[in-house]
Amino acid sequence: MPYAKTAVFWFIGLLAVLVLGFWKSYFAVFFDGMHGAHHAHGLAMLAWVLLLIHQAWRVRTKNLAAHRSVGKLSILLAPIIAVSGVWVTFHNVARFEEPIPPFGYSIFLLGLYSVFLYVVLYTLAMVHRKNVQFHARFMVGTALVFLVPGLSRAMGNYIAPTGLPALTFYQCLWVPLVVALVLLALDWKNGRTRKPFTIFVVLWAIQMALWHLLPYVGPWRRFTAWAASVGA
């Protein structure tokens, strides 16, 4: 990857966005009796980003033996992220009052679809772990999945109150897509593989379409209502 040497710094930037975005709602109230779903998912996500930083640093310093050894931890961490992601999504949708607004149905979609997308990208990264170009790009994709929650909260908590232009939650949904398109363009320009980021772009675009469509689909509304009852 032409940007492999700088990947570690982008992952550190992602960590900063997540910590900033979740500071008020999670880290600052860590010991205030928060629901177990939030702790499971929050700590698992934090561990994943720290793992990405470590792995990118090992690649940058050409310590591939340590990269492969520590990378095995992802096999344990990935299922925790997936299960806790579904758990916290069910819990969060239960916090909407009846009748659930269209935004609630879309947020529920985003939570479950993010878990689905993360699992797909991680699985592809492991299937292609011996293909550096594919493996690295799919792992970058897992990082992009985590961007929206932290970015949207950072915008709402710190940028919007100052009166400066801030992205809305919906606008934040476009950021991973734009980043993936830029990375895809760079790969196309440099004659490198375009398959991984093409897959990400297509899957994320599907999520964007479903965001608008599913709130008005009966079976999805009934499934969301059931999930809310379970999450409660």
Image (cartoon, helix red, strand yellow):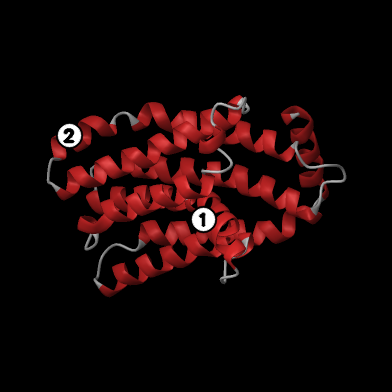
Q: Earlier in the sequence, mark 2 or mark 1?
A: 2
Split into 4 quadrants, where in the image is the N terminus? bottom left
Q: Look at label 1 and name its amino acid.
A: Leu
Farthest-out residue, right: 99
Circle nearer the viewer, 2 or 1? 1
Q: Nearer the viewer, residue 36 or 129?
A: 36
Q: Nearer the viewer, residue 175 or 113?
A: 175
| Left or right placement of residue 179 versus residue 213 in this view | left
Q: For numbered disc 2, what is the local secondary structure?
A: helix
Q: Quadrant of residue 181?
A: bottom left
Q: Name the residue under label 1.
A: 151
Q: Mark 2 points at which residue?
A: 66
| Left or right placement of residue 105 versus residue 99 in this view | left
**34 lies above or below 222:** above
For the residues bearing labels 2 and 1, Cβ distance under 8 angstroms: no
- Residue 57 placement (x, y as % from top left): 21, 45
How far, Cα to Cα, is label 2 from label 1?
31 Å
Which residue: 58% across, 65% down? 162
Q: Look at label 2 and name its amino acid.
A: Ala
Residue neighbourhood size for the residue with mark 2, other residues' Cα within 10 Å, grouped as few (<14), some (14–19), many (≥20): few
